[in-house]
Every structure is written in C-alpha cells, then in structure tokens.
Amino acid sequence: MRYGLLLVSALIALGCTEKRSLTESERRYNQALNEQNQIIIKANDYLNSNIIGNITDDITHLIYAKEQLINAKQVLIKAKIVGIKSPEVNLLSDRLSEYDLIAATEAMRLIELALEKTIQFRYAVDDMPLVPLSGASLESDHMIKYMGQKYNGELTACCISTLKDIEVFLLGSEQDAYWSLRKHILNLEMSLSRFLEDDKYKVDYERSLDELATNIRKPQRFIS
C-alpha cells in the first residue's frame, strides 16, 4: 500500500512539473511571435489577392506589404526580444526583394519617357512662330503657359506618380544602384527643368542616365 501511495505521489509531482506555468519572458516571446506571424500571414494573403504581374498597378500593393513587413519586425523589437530571426519574416523579405529589379527597370523606362516628353515640349516651344514686338506677346505667353500646364499634367500622369511610388518601395534597399536611382527620382523634376534650359547639363544628364541603366543591369553589390 505504501508503495502505491509513493507511485501516486510521484505521478502527481511529474504532472505538476509538466504543467508548470510559463515564465513572463516565455509568455512575452510566444505572444510576440504569434503577433508577428499573424502580420506576415496577412501580408502574404494580401499580395496573393492583389498582385497581378504589372508593376505599375502592383507597386502600391508592394509598398503596403513592405510596410507590414516593417511592422512585423518591430513587434519583436518592442517586446525587447533580440537575436531571433523568423523564417516567415525572411521569406516575405525575399519575396518582396524579387520585385526590386522589376521596379528599378520600370523606373528607368519612365525616366526615359519623361525625358522624351520634355524634349518634345522644348521642340514645341521652340517651333512656335515669333510674334512681332508691336503685337505684344500676350497670346504667345498664354499659349506657352497652356502648353506648360499640359506638359506637367502628362508628365505626372505617365511618369512622376509611379516613379514616386517606386522610390518609396526601394527605400531601405542597401544596393548602391537602387540608392542612386532613388536620388534620380527625387531630383527628376528639377533635373528636367534644367534639361530644358542648359544644353551642357542635357549632355551630362543623359550620360548619367546611361551609366545608371548599366549599373542596374549589373549584379548588385551592397553599399559599404
């Protein structure tokens, strides 16, 4: 009988050991990991539902997914959990990185298109017939203003809006060619304005675009 009681006591003690309460750090870790995984799952589901394979249409969805990736990483940081690399986070990061070159290539196409429209605008202004001084150039001023507004509107619609989205998407990339591309995008409107007025700058700017396009096509290296 005594041995039976000892056996029962041992089993009870074993059960208590197996069912011990989690420590505060363990609860915090599990909660943070679960919260992070939920964010990653939602981000992947969002991409699966919205990406159609056209970077111009997809870019805003990619930006949203990248924002969710950042939020997921912040969960562990806020929970003061360090040294943990989530496979799910890494997989989403890799998935988004696959679009970097696609976005960069599209950005170069749009910059070239913006440049082409700028050249066309300059030719159109240069081809305007001269108005005699006695006739006061009010009519030609109105025409140039109209053409300028039309040019700006077309530029925004075809290129600038998407380029700004691509710049945001590539933000945080450590690859030097993409960093240079972001600078070109941020300075594009100023560069096009100078392109209209300065022939020397025109030559230098076209050369810089050729170099950038070449660097983007090369295997990327990280900024040191």
Image (cartoon, helix red, strand yellow):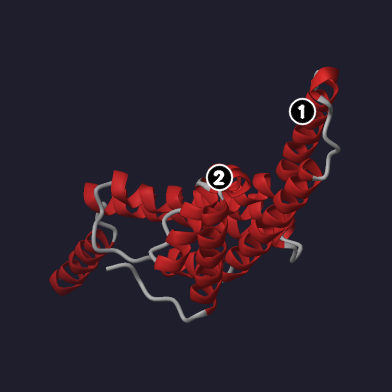
* Mark identifier at residue 211: none
| Badge 1: residue crowd in 10 Å (few <14, some 14–19, many ≥20) | few
Task: Indicate the position of residue 54 as horizontal and vertical percent values.
Answer: 75, 63
Label total for image? 2
Q: Circle 2 — which element?
A: helix
Task: Indicate the position of residue 27 as horizontal and vertical percent values.
Answer: 30, 50
The amino acid type of the residue labelled 2 equals Arg
Task: Indicate the position of residue 121 as horizontal and vertical percent values.
Answer: 76, 46
Who comes first in sequence, dot 1 or dot 2? 1
Q: On the rendered structure, is 198 left or right of 116?
A: left
Give the residue displayed 48% in from the left and 74% down from the top.
215
Image quadrant holding the N terminus, namely bottom left
Q: Which residue is mark 2?
A: 194
Q: Outermost residue toward the bottom?
A: 219
Give the residue displayed 78% in from the left and 25% down from the top.
141
- Do the residues bearing badges 1 and 2 touch, measured as CB atoms within 8 Å? no
Q: Quadrant of residue 155?
A: top right
Q: Circle 1 — which element?
A: helix
Image quadrant holding the C terminus, namely bottom left
The Cα atoms of the two marked residues, 1 and 2, are separated by 18 Å
Q: Which residue is mark 1?
A: 145
Q: Nearer the viewer, residue 170 or 58?
A: 170
Where is 65 relative to 86, above or below? above
The amino acid type of the residue labelled 1 equals Lys
Task: Indicate the position of residue 65 as horizontal and vertical percent values.
Answer: 57, 53
Q: Nearer the viewer, residue 46 or 183?
A: 183
Residue 58 appears in the figure: no
Q: Nearer the viewer, residue 97 or 32?
A: 97
Give the residue displayed 71% in from the left and 42% down from the top.
156
